Image (cartoon, helix red, strand yellow):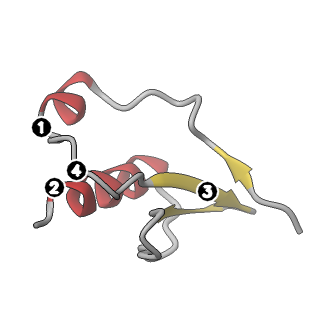
Amino acid sequence: MHDRHTDGVPPTAAAIASEPATAGHEPTTVERGSFCTARCSCGWYGPARRSRDRARTDAAEHRAAP
């Protein structure tokens, strides 16, 4: 099985405005079959979601966390 990155899917404008730039955190979403998971360069990963929008929200929440 392979990972397919969905970086080409832009987040909503509201999500971009609410995301402060945090050094060391670069969350992305990764698709695996019919599921999408948020993952970060720091080693964090969120739960597998069928909703890609919810996975992007998970990534945004992680980026905003202290």
Image location of residue 56, percent across then percent down: 38, 49
Q: Which of the two marks, 3 or 4, is nearer to us in this view?
A: 4
Which of the marked residues, 3 or 2, is nearer the chain's N terminus? Answer: 3
**Residue position for label 2:** 64
**Residue position for label 4:** 22
**Residue position for label 1:** 18
Q: Which of the two marks, 4 or 1, is nearer to us in this view?
A: 4
**Residue position for label 3:** 30
Instruction: Say which element carries label 3.
Output: strand
Which of the marked residues, 3 or 4, is nearer the chain's N terminus? Answer: 4
Cα gap from disc 3 to disc 2, whole angstroms:
19 Å
Of the pair 57 and 34, the residue shown nearer to us: 57
Badge 2 density bin: few <14, some 14–19, many ≥20, Cα 10 Å: few
Q: Residue furthest right?
A: 1
Which of the marked residues, 1 or 2, is nearer the chain's N terminus? Answer: 1
Image location of residue 49, percent across then percent down: 49, 67
Cα gap from disc 4 to disc 1, whole angstroms:
12 Å
Relative height, residue 32 to residue 13 (above, below): below
Identify the amino acid type marked 1: Ser
Check if mark 1's residue and mark 2's residue have beta carbons within 8 Å: yes
Residue drawn 34% across the image and 58% down it: 24
Badge 1 density bin: few <14, some 14–19, many ≥20, Cα 10 Å: few
Cα gap from disc 3 to disc 1, whole angstroms:
22 Å
Judged left or right of residue 15, residue 52 is right
Judged left or right of residue 40, residue 2 is right
